[in-house]
Amino acid sequence: MGKASRRKNRDVKGPKQIPAPFEARPFKGLPNETEWVAMREILPAATATIRVKVPAVEAPEGTPAPAWSSLEVGSEHEVTLATVLPLAWPGLNRGEGDVLSALQTGSSTGDASRDIAQAILTSLANEPGQPTVGLPQAMAHTPRLQDVLVSDTMTAELHESFDFWLTGKEDALDEAGQLSMERANEAIVPTQRLDAVESAFWCLMGDRAYVRWLLPHDEDAATTALARLKAAGEHTLGGQSTLLGAFRGAGLLVPVFEVDPAADPQSWNAPLGELAARLEARLGDDAPLTHDERRAREGFSSRQVTIR
């Protein structure tokens, strides 16, 4: 094949679309970033209400307009965020302005902010009763949550079941959706919020209980502060508690403590508040790490697990 033919074949492919760039911390800059990460990564059943504004369509010339291009630019809409929806739908338009959009979905471009924003806008444009399925891959021109969010706060409301999928609209789910809800309810992990700090949650998995705390700080600084606490023996919640390590979720550090399952979940509030004060003090310490602190930091780093 000659050079002219190869050039012609490239030309007929149409405008080049740039894939969405990877974002290690996709919710950075959003109000209550830790709550977004909690709903995306660890909470089983939760909802939150937000308001979004429809942005102008900026698709490259010659590419298909997005599904939400029919929405009025600049119009504001209320949306209910959910951890998960039936059959892993990214969204569901239940009609009369009642729109759900899920944060925990099976696909990701490497920027959860674009994925979720696209699902929200598409769900708003759907016909009443229509779930959002088969979303195209988000691209670099796809708006992010940071581009569409109007709300100045977001706090997850925890639920003991997925009955919020219905909320009085029993015809919102077909037989497959009903079965999906039944299975989800059977597998739900009991979870309670601890109010001593922002975004800390107690959960019971089998016969073992854990406290997971989403730290809003820079990951590197948080890891160093935890290492200093561990070297000083000040890193647990006291009593029958153990700091198992930490995992990385959407760019934030999430320490995980195993606690006494027989204790009242809310009894961990006071120890958690005290630990938060100790951690805050260590965050301002810029002295070189001691030998024990370096070892502790290396231990945390080696046991970290990245989720998404």
Image (cartoon, rainbow, N blue to C red):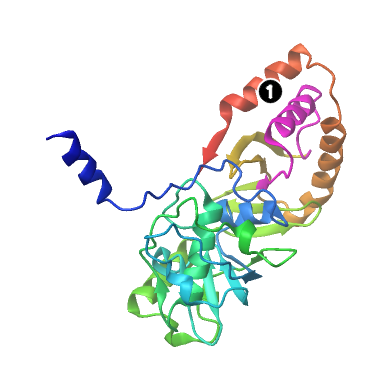
Q: Position of residue 161 (x, y in %)?
A: 55, 70
Vertical arrangement, residue 84 with respect to residue 169, above or below: above
Quarter of the image that includes the N terminus: top left
Indicate whether residue 234 is drawn in magenta: yes
Quarter of the image for residue 7 reads top left
The residue at the point 64 percent across, 46 percent down is 210
Residue 170 at x, y percent in the picture: 46, 86
Residue 155 placement, left or right of 114: right
Work out whether residue 188 can be spotted: no
Place residue 44 in its image quadrant: bottom right
Question: From which residue to which does the magenta span run?
Answer: 211-238
Extreme-left residue of the structure: 1
Residue 211: tell me if it is visible: yes
Q: Give yes or no for residue 110 being in the magenta stretch.
A: no
Disc 1 residue type (three-letter): Arg
The image position of residue 236, as x and y in percent, is 75, 35
Residue behind mark 1? 297
**In the shown orientation, is residue 149 left or right of residue 58?**
right
With respect to residue 168, does 216 lie above or below? above
Residue 72 position in % (x across, y down) = 55, 78
**Residue at (69% x, 55% y) in the render:** 30
Closest to the observer: 51 or 184?
51
Q: Residue at left 47%, top 71%?
A: 68
Q: Quick one: SS at disc 1? A: helix
Q: Is residue 160 above or below residue 29?
A: below
Identity of the residue furthest to the front in this view: 4
User: How crowded is the residue under tag 1: few (<14 C-alpha within 10 Å), some, or many (20+)?
Assistant: many
In the rendered view, does 294 fall on the left or right side of 167?
right
- Residue at screen point 58% across, 74% down: 73
Q: Nearer the viewer, residue 271 or 9?
A: 9
